[in-house]
Amino acid sequence: MIKTLHKRGIRSHHMYTAGLGSIGLALASWALSTRLEEQGMDRADRWGIFVGEWAPTFFAIGVAMRLEEMREESGGIPQQRGEMEERVGGRASHAMR
């Protein structure tokens, strides 16, 4: 699924943006529900939770997309923490030059 999304042009930053948008939409739906519906706070809480449940999913997909992007850029996913730090440190020092 991640490879298919990546091939269709969806990138990790799109998923992170969707996660942040979901948080904002959860707050907005909760606030609007408390003001516009007569069912009370319980209904507003359910709306906020329903919409807010998507945020962790979007962030998790964003992380998976980022790993796919790294694999494509460098030809593989780091298997150990040290290898990841070498890649990140190598890029940072290379970018400063």
Image: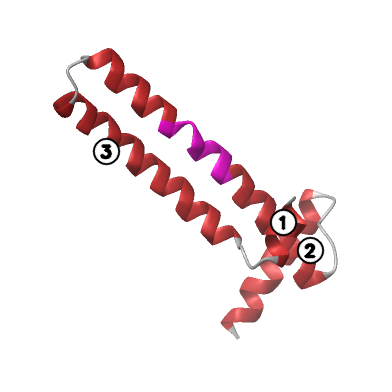
Marks 3, 2: nearer the viewer = 3
Looking at the image, residue 68 lies above or below residue 28: below
x 28%, y 22%: residue: 44
Looking at the image, residue 76 lies above or below residue 15: below
Residue under label 1, please give it: 67
Residue under label 2, please give it: 71
Disc 3, SS: helix
Looking at the image, residue 49 lies above or below residue 17: above
Q: Quadrant of residue 88?
A: bottom right
Residue under label 3, please give it: 28
Disc 2, SS: helix
Marks 1/3 in contact by CB < 8 Å: the verdict is: no
Q: Distance between the residues labelled 3 and 2?
A: 37 Å
Marks 2/1 in contact by CB < 8 Å: the verdict is: yes
Q: Position of residue 28 (x, y in %)?
A: 26, 38
Q: Is residue 79 magenta?
A: no
Q: The residue under label 3 is which amino acid type?
A: Ala
Q: In which quarter of the image is residue 96?
A: bottom right
Task: Tell me the tag on residue 33.
Answer: none
x 69%, y 62%: residue: 6
For the magenta stretch, what is the residue range?
51-59
Q: Where is residue 62 in the image (x, y as percent from the top left)?
A: 60, 51
Q: How far apart are marks 1 and 3 (CA)?
A: 32 Å
Q: In this view, does 53 lie to the left or right of 44?
A: right
- 6 or 84: nearer the eye? 6
Marks 3/2 in contact by CB < 8 Å: the verdict is: no
* Label 3 or label 2, whichever comes before in sequence order: 3
Q: The residue under label 1 is which amino acid type?
A: Leu
Q: The residue under label 2 is which amino acid type?
A: Arg
Q: Position of residue 34 (x, y in %)?
A: 19, 24
Looking at the image, residue 66 lies above or below residue 26: below
Label 2: few (<14), some or many (≥20) within 10 Å? few
